[in-house]
Image (tube, rainbow, N blue to C red):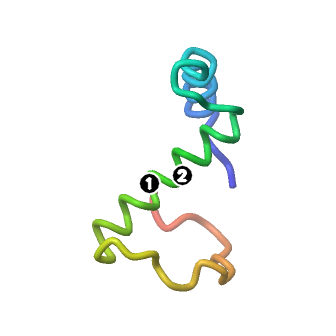
Amino acid sequence: MQIPRDTRARIRAAYRATAAAEGHRSFGDLITRLVEAEAQRLEQTYNHGRPFAGGDQPLPTGRPLAD
């Protein structure tokens, strides 16, 4: 997985500025919370709030579907 450099820089800066106030134990903790929040949003929006099936299946390889 690759994250664009500018996005990575923004989130690292946000972590440094807010870690104590938000209670993030590590940068990885913040990333986990962000990813979990987006997964939950997608589940709410597209799957009646339930986890999607197939999370343990390999993802397709190759070029992204769209930019």
- For residue 27, side relative to residue 49 (left or right): right
Residue drawn at the location 67% of the way across and 74% of the way down: 61
| Residue highlighted by disc 2 | 35
Question: Looking at the picture, which amino acid does disc 2 mark?
Answer: Val
Question: Looking at the picture, which amino acid does disc 1 mark?
Answer: Glu
Q: Which of 59 and 27 is in front in this view?
A: 27
Q: Which of 52 and 25 is in front in this view?
A: 25
The image shows residue 22, relative to residue 44, as above or below, that is above
Structural crowding at the residue carrying mark 1, measured as other residues with C-alpha within 10 Å and reported as few (<14), some (14–19) or many (≥20): few
- For residue 49, side relative to residue 18 (left or right): left
- Where residue 10 appears, as percent x and y from the top left, is 55, 25
Structural crowding at the residue carrying mark 2, measured as other residues with C-alpha within 10 Å and reported as few (<14), some (14–19) or many (≥20): few
Asked if labels 1 and 2 touch by Cβ distance under 8 angstroms, the answer is yes
| Residue highlighted by disc 1 | 38
Residue drawn at the location 69% of the way across and 33% of the way down: 27
- CA distance separating discs 2 and 1: 5 Å
Residue drawn at the location 64% of the way across and 76% of the way down: 59
- For residue 28, side relative to residue 42 (left or right): right
- For residue 1, side relative to residue 13 (left or right): right
